[in-house]
Amino acid sequence: MKLAIGNDHVAIEMKNEIKAHLESRGIEVINVGTDEPGSFDYAISGYKVAKMVAAGEVDGGVLICGTGVGISLAANKVKGIRACVCSEPFTAKLSKQHNNSNIIAFGARVVGVELAKMIVDEWVDAEFQGGRHERRVNMIMEIEATQRLAAVDER
């Protein structure tokens, strides 16, 4: 498995800890975030990771900023990305099982390092369940591709 990891200036330390944790699990991690303490725009890392995921260069992504919100919003603007902000492991697991998320995000100001490791582990270990969930993910992709949803707009 190969993952891209991105961050802003707030999350340098947590990014490094999560990267080391993932590597200790045998996962290749490509760092596209900042390592400089000066102000860094989270949208840059969110975009870089999302482009790599969408292009199939990596199997998924991990994004960390202050809250996880801004960086995930930037990533979600890239076609094909389903980035989910998770502040606990259960939501991380279900984001993959039910929503086929391909990027996990969290906030360095919201969760501690040990909880972040649990969030990442649950997400990495989960698999998309398909079935009824696939129909819903397809609806999300329909909205993304067409800016419409037939189930609503054609009634």
Image (tube, grey):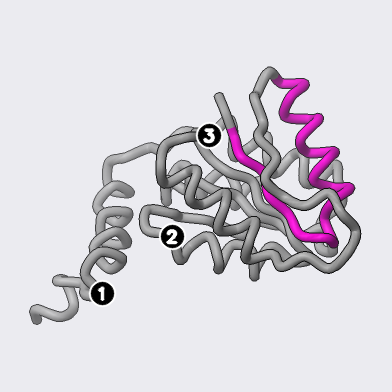
Mark 1 neighbour density, 10 Å: few (under 14) some (14–19) many (20 or more): few
Find disc 1 in the rendering and name its residue: 147
Residue at the image point whose x is 59% and y is 62% from the top: 72
Q: CA distance from mark 1 to mark 3?
A: 29 Å
Q: Are marks 1 and 3 in contact (CB under 8 Å)?
A: no
At which x and y percent is residue 35?
A: 83, 49
Secondary structure of the residue carrying tag 1 is loop
- For this rendering, which residue is in front, 72 or 54? 54
Specify start and end residues of the magenta stretch as a single range: 3-25
At which x and y percent is residue 87?
A: 71, 57
- For this rendering, which residue is in front, 97 or 150? 150
Residue at the image point whose x is 18% and y is 78% from the top: 152
Name the mark nearer the viewer: 2 or 1: 2
Residue at the image point whose x is 76% and y is 35% from the top: 19
- For this rendering, which residue is in front, 146 or 45? 45
At which x and y percent is residue 137?
A: 32, 54
Q: Are marks 2 and 1 in contact (CB under 8 Å)?
A: no
Find disc 3 in the rendering and name its residue: 126
121 vs 110: above or below: above
The dot on residue 78 is 2
Residue at the image point whose x is 72% and y is 50% from the top: 33
| Quadrant housing the C terminus | bottom left
Secondary structure of the residue carrying tag 3 is loop
